[in-house]
Amino acid sequence: MLLHSLKKEKQNLQANNLIIENFSESHLDEVFSIESNSNPTPWKIDTFKQVLEVRTMSFVIKDENKIIAFCIASKALDECHLQNISVIDGFRNQGLGTYVIEVLIGRAKIFGLKVIFLEVRESNKVAISFYKKLNFKEVGRREGYYKKDSGRESALLMSLALS
Ligand SMILES: CC(C)(COP(=O)(O)OP(=O)(O)OC[C@H]1O[C@@H](n2cnc3c(N)ncnc32)[C@H](O)[C@@H]1OP(=O)(O)O)[C@@H](O)C(=O)NCCC(=O)NCCS
């Protein structure tokens, strides 16, 4: 499984001329800028910095030298928590987000993880349909989990079992 996942990751990268790099300090400014353009209540740069302080499964995808997508994920016991994902405008709806999740799944399997879970704003219909297409199932709801411009909104809790 490990070899298969690594081989698949490499083949996809070669086919598309993309580069995957583990998330590091050198990516902070660019990732923060993407986040600021993608999220109604963006993460603060310090939140991304905190990600770097703990064991992380996070990575970015580059086309040439430019970051076109990022994935922030952590692991605890046999679970992977997908905390943030974004594809830059202009590259959306072309399969890149799906590829990001495939890479994450491959890596989670290498670590022997059994499940990926995530929270998504219930108003983020695009992301919900994206996760459903990828076979994530809705497994719960967290009331008032997210801030919005005024007030709060709930999160759907979704998970994908890894076999
Ligand atoms: C969610 C996101 C990562 C999806 O990435 P993407 O590269 O556009 O996704 P893909 O091209 O791989 O799309 C896969 C599936 O997702 C769904 N999808 C993607 N964009 C969609 C849209 N605009 N409307 C409805 N469904 C959509 C479709 O089911 C699509 O399958 P199809 O191509 O067979 O129709 C991207 O839209 C994004 O970065 N959004 C802003 C940040 C965000 O909301 N992150 C999620 C936080 S929880």
Image: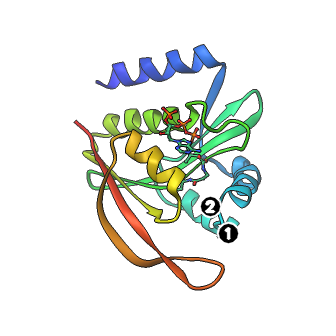
Looking at the image, which is closer to me, 143 or 102? 143
Give the Cα distance between marks 1 and 2: 7 Å
The number of numbered badges drawn on the structure is 2
Residue denoted by label 2: 48
Residue 99 visible? The answer is yes
Badge 1: residue crowd in 10 Å (few <14, some 14–19, many ≥20) = few
Q: Secondary structure at mark 1?
A: loop
Residue 41 percent coordinates (x, y): 65, 70
Residue denoted by label 1: 44
User: Which image quarter holds the C terminus?
Assistant: top left
Q: Residue at x 74, y 57 (%)?
A: 37
Query: Splitting the image into 4 quarters, where does residue 45 fall?
Result: bottom right
Residue 61 percent coordinates (x, y): 63, 35
User: Which image quarter holds the N terminus?
Assistant: top left
Asked if the residue under mark 2 is in contact with the one under mark 1, i.e. CB atoms within 8 Å, the reply is yes
Residue 156 percent coordinates (x, y): 39, 64
Residue 84 visible? The answer is no
Instruction: Judge left or right: residue 147 versus residue 133.
Output: right
Query: Splitting the image into 4 quarters, where does residue 20 fall?
Result: top right
- Type of amino acid under label 1: Lys
Badge 2: residue crowd in 10 Å (few <14, some 14–19, many ≥20) = some
Q: Residue at x 68, y 35 (%)?
A: 91
